[in-house]
Image (cartoon, grey):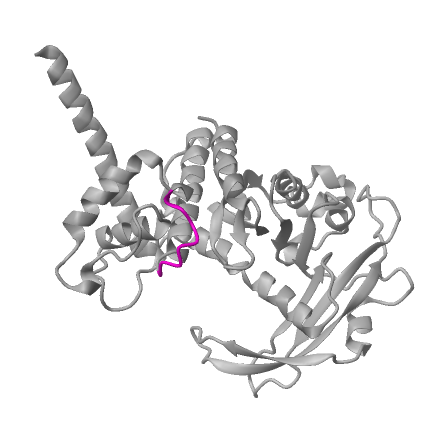
Amino acid sequence: MTPDEMIATAFARTQAACVGRDVLAIQDTTVTRSAGGGGSYLHAMIAVDAESGATLGALDAEFLERTKGRRESRHIRTFEDRDSARWLEATRRAGRIDGAARVTVVADREADMFALFAQRPAHVDLLVRARHDRALADGGKLAARIASGPRLGYAALDLPAQPGRPGRAAQLSVRFGRLRLRAPGGGCGTGTAPVTMTYVDLCEETPPAGASPVHWRLLTTLAVETVEDALDIAARYARRWQIEEVFRTMKRKGFDIEALAIRDDAPRNRLVLACFIAATIVMQMTAERDGPGIRPLTDAFDPQDRPLLAALCRDLEGKTERQKNPHAPDTLAFATWVCARLGGWTGYYGKPGPIVILRGWIEFQTLKQGARLAQTMIQETRQDV
């Protein structure tokens, strides 16, 4: 199969899971092979349920090759010829999702582009972290205008511990409002009409000594009327970490795609894309490990997988209640429990993480292939007899 056929198949399955839901189409870029100042990159997009946080599946993927010198020539190339056009192309792909209650594209600061704001499909909302201090249509700059506005509320945020940084509580001021952004010069091909966006600014104004302040400046097409609306926008943006978890599962802790020794781009890209789709499935299972019962088994497994999952479950269950699969057989949570046990989880000592579930999922695929081969051999033997 070609990469286009692979992602089209994944898109069709994901779209079925999006029907009736408030969908976040989260996109980002990750390096798959480094080469000096450039290398190979994958720009990917996944669907996430805005309300529950469940990963619904893969939506899009595009491969990029970067070399030195492209950045220096960006001002003499049209927007469509730049690598950054991928953000708009993926947004248009999100616009082809049928049946969702709402689709909002979520992206980090690299997607802060006037062309994206101006040319998005009208029925697709945007939520992007601001990178540029943009000029406003009525004069002035974005950062100064926001800073001069009133604080409309406060929010408490618990920051988890990270290497070299202890966990702490942060007090954030909340500002929000509407702005008209002036079109930049430089051949973006977007015309000169200003674009109206909503901003949500959350800033830690008095961080502890030696600590970097938390500051999120978000631009969105969604309406914000209250502090609660502003905090909902921030919560939606916080879902963006899920695509980072997908990339983490693809890399050293999971499939280790950066260690692939395949020189030819075509087979290597097919394998990388297969790993992306598989890593997204692992994230779907991770979201269901506690058994909320939100997603059906067929989100990530074929209907024909039911008998093998049931047989493995019977073999893996122990005598105690904590060693029993508590989930209904037709749920994704049921299959997640089986894969977690295959990956080494005992049922005790916390929750299985993405890497444990990945190991179990790979083991399941191996067993599935073995069962298929065994069935073929049995059929051939019967025919010979």
Q: Quadrant of residue 110?
A: bottom right
Q: Nearer the viewer, residue 322 or 196?
A: 322
Q: At 41% from the left edge and 57% from the top edge, which residue is drawn?
A: 287
* Image quarter of residue 147: bottom right
x then y, percent, for residue 225: 75, 68
Residue visible at 19% across and 60% down? 323
x and y percent of residue 262 in the render? 38, 35
Residue 256 within the segment the image draws in magenta = no
x and y, in percent, of residue 189 in the image: 82, 41
Count of all numbered marks drawn on residues in the image: 0
Q: Is residue 205 left or right of residue 118?
A: left
Tell me which corner region of the image, top left, top right, bottom left or bottom right, holds residue 302. top left
70 and 42: which is toward the camera: 42
Chief secondary structure of the magenta portion: loop
**Residue 39 visible in the snapshot:** no
Quadrant that contains the C terminus: top left
Which residues, given as a range, are shown in magenta?
A: 290-297
Up the image or down, 99 lies above or below 21; here it is above
Inspect this view and state whether residue 239 appears. yes
The residue lying toward the viewer, choosing from 310 and 9, is 310
Question: Looking at the image, which residue sits at the far left?
Answer: 385
> In this view, which residue lies farthest toward the bottom?
209
Which quadrant holds the N terminus? top left
Name of the residue lying farthest toward the top: 384
Image x and y of residue 208, in percent: 57, 87
